[in-house]
Amino acid sequence: MPTIKEIAKACNVSVATVSNIINHKGSVGDATRERVEKVIREMNYTPNYVAKNLKTKNTRSIGVIAEDMTVFALPDIIDGITEYCEEADYQILLVNLRLYKKFQDNYYRDNRHKEIVRQEFQKLLAKQVEGIIYVAAHERLIDIIPEDLPIPTVVAYGFTGSGKIPSVVVKDIKGAHDLVSYIVSRGHRKIGVIAGKKESIHTQSRLEGYQKALFEGGILYDPDMVTYGDWDRQSGYENTDILLEKGATAIFCMNDFMAGGTYDRLEELGLHAGKDVAVAGYDNREMACYEKPPLTTMALPLHDIGYKACQIIIGILTKEEVELDNGNCFVECIPCIRESVNAVEA
Amino acid sequence: MPTIKEIAKACNVSVATVSNIINHKGSVGDATRERVEKVIREMNYTPNYVAKNLKTKNTRSIGVIAEDMTVFALPDIIDGITEYCEEADYQILLVNLRLYKKFQDNYYRDNRHKEIVRQEFQKLLAKQVEGIIYVAAHERLIDIIPEDLPIPTVVAYGFTGSGKIPSVVVKDIKGAHDLVSYIVSRGHRKIGVIAGKKESIHTQSRLEGYQKALFEGGILYDPDMVTYGDWDRQSGYENTDILLEKGATAIFCMNDFMAGGTYDRLEELGLHAGKDVAVAGYDNREMACYEKPPLTTMALPLHDIGYKACQIIIGILTKEEVELDNGNCFVECIPCIRESVNAVEA
DNA sequence: TTGTAAGCGTTATCAT
DNA sequence: ATGATAACGCTTACAA
């Protein structure tokens, strides 16, 4: 690969002139410009960005640290990041922590991963990225981001608690609210819920959304109508009976898998989802539209989360900061109304 | 961020000494080493990699060009790449072409994307990556890789045809063979197939595997027993009747979605998959294990494809080249035997 | 054991 | 309009 020096020599001009031509700076005569451009094409010259970056002290690159690429939310979030990067002409340095594979399910309680994260930040810093996006595998409090970083950081799909590090998260309260309001609008008054794990932020927010929707519908909130699962299909299956016994005509499951479990149990009981009992899920996983009947659910705005996170970080870099709500950016879910929530018969 | 010069000054030593200490080279006195290391820690110094890379002319980074991150195969492939990179201490520069979103379904017939690809290779070259992995969204002939690249390239999940650019692909023939052999071993002699699109490499290889398995089982190959779908659930549904009329006791669908369609039709007919008719899929998509009954299928070795691709490219860089079969590396599928293939009654 | 200095491929300042 | 040259932060002969 030729260098700018060789181009200069081949053209009998100085490197400064070649540099000016490449970067459309200064003023150069038309004749020399054409001559140099021709040689550049012929010799297939591309400027060495690492040299350029050293000199200009900007790399136009941002680091993306993913907790685990293979978790369902991540690809879409990263896709959103790459879309914004493409528009803004930034490059991405990708780090995949593979936390699930290394530490299993509750890696985030394992202290070993804190040190790993610290090291990765350091490496990215050494590579001179201009900002870092940390992508969590599921929403929770992310308190392992070094606070004294010389470059901006934002966390996508997780809260930071810190006022200094912006986070981009799902507008879960509104999502659940809208979904349950829809169920109410179909005439249901006895709406059971199969929640996720109690300590999950998703669970707490979605429960709040549920409560708001009930309130607006003038429906008494009965704490006994909410059961807790563990996000797995089996736990949806198991909690269904409890809710049915309490007279629920509709069941709001906090994810699609548990809704699938509810479908299973309903079928066993000779009941039909979307006919005898209304069922709604959350997340809009791939299987949701293949269930019978297709499951009404809330799609997570994953792509937009990534897009926003990137917008925020590049906004900080270019001083065109985007507005935040107390350090957080909330992104709205997209309702997927399908056939599993029947209208209740009068 | 301090530079090596500042560290040197703060320690009253030369930059060479500091450099030697950082890189564990040359010989330095214990006293100075400790003093310098202490200052490095105190001043929170990290070497600037872009300067280092400029000097040493290696970046220990490889470029990964993904046709579209959001396609189901990609995250696992990239996960495999990152795993190997982590072991080998290489970094990843990620480019997401977003081809599906830009050009819809048959983007690869659209000539515009060739120019895009060329440009991305050029950019990566400028960034001084040491190798490039091109990750296709589905297996097919990839003939758009520039041939005269100064760095090694490999394509993952696609064939190159060129002897110069290695490709890593699924051992589809064996996968289909093993799956169909299993069906045969369960006593089936009339095995229909719902293939994918005719021009797809996946379709052709899996058909060959099917034929081999029949041959080994001493079963006549009846071309009328193979129907062609378009990979979508609906086409599985539609082709089921044809096969049933021909007396098939088992149906091999070339992907899980079409197998889902077959389930749907069977249910309508009052038949039970895994009882009245055996059904097998391919790919092991997320929904496969949630079907009723859980679908027997072949898992694609996506993670291994990425891992291998990365191994090959770093192998070339380190001159420890890995062995290839005519420029290709074939990776084996993993059978997922579940409950959809019943034993035929005597 | 430690220091000096050249050089990696650029950009940018200042002359000419 | 063009050219010399210093500088970016580092590594690496080579010298001391």
Image: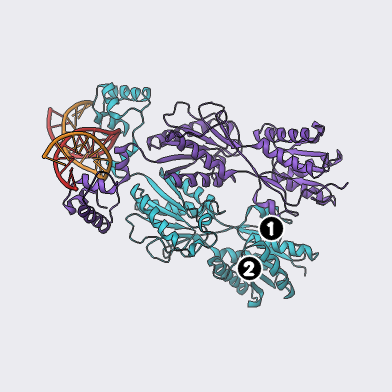
Chain colours: A cyan, B purple, C red, D orange
The image shows residue B47, relative to residue B227, as above or below, that is below
Label 1 residue SS: loop
Residue A133 drawn at (x, y percent) = 43, 54
- Checking the image for residue B119, the label placed there is none
The image shows residue B209, relative to residue B274, as above or below, that is above
- Quick check: can you spot residue A222? no
Q: Is residue B275 left or right of A188 when viewed as pictured?
A: right
Q: How crowded is mark 2: few (under 14 residues within 10 Å), some or many (20 or more)?
A: many
| Total tally of numbered discs in the picture | 2
Q: Quadrant of the C terminus of chain A?
A: bottom right
Q: Which of A66 and B56 is in front in this view?
A: B56
- Quick check: can you spot residue B138? yes
Residue placed under numbered mark 1 in the picture: A295
Pick whichever of labels 2 and 1 is earlier in the sequence: 2
Residue placed under numbered mark 2 in the picture: A229
Which kind of residue does numbered mark 2 sit on?
Gly
Q: Is residue A133 left or right of B274 when viewed as pictured?
A: left
The image shows residue A324, relative to residue B164, as above or below, that is below
Labels 2 and 1 touching (C-beta < 8 A): no
Which kind of residue does numbered mark 1 sit on?
Leu
Q: Quadrant of the N terminus of chain A?
A: top left
Q: Nearer the viewer, residue B191 or A314?
A: B191
The image shows residue B236, relative to residue A2, as above or below, that is below
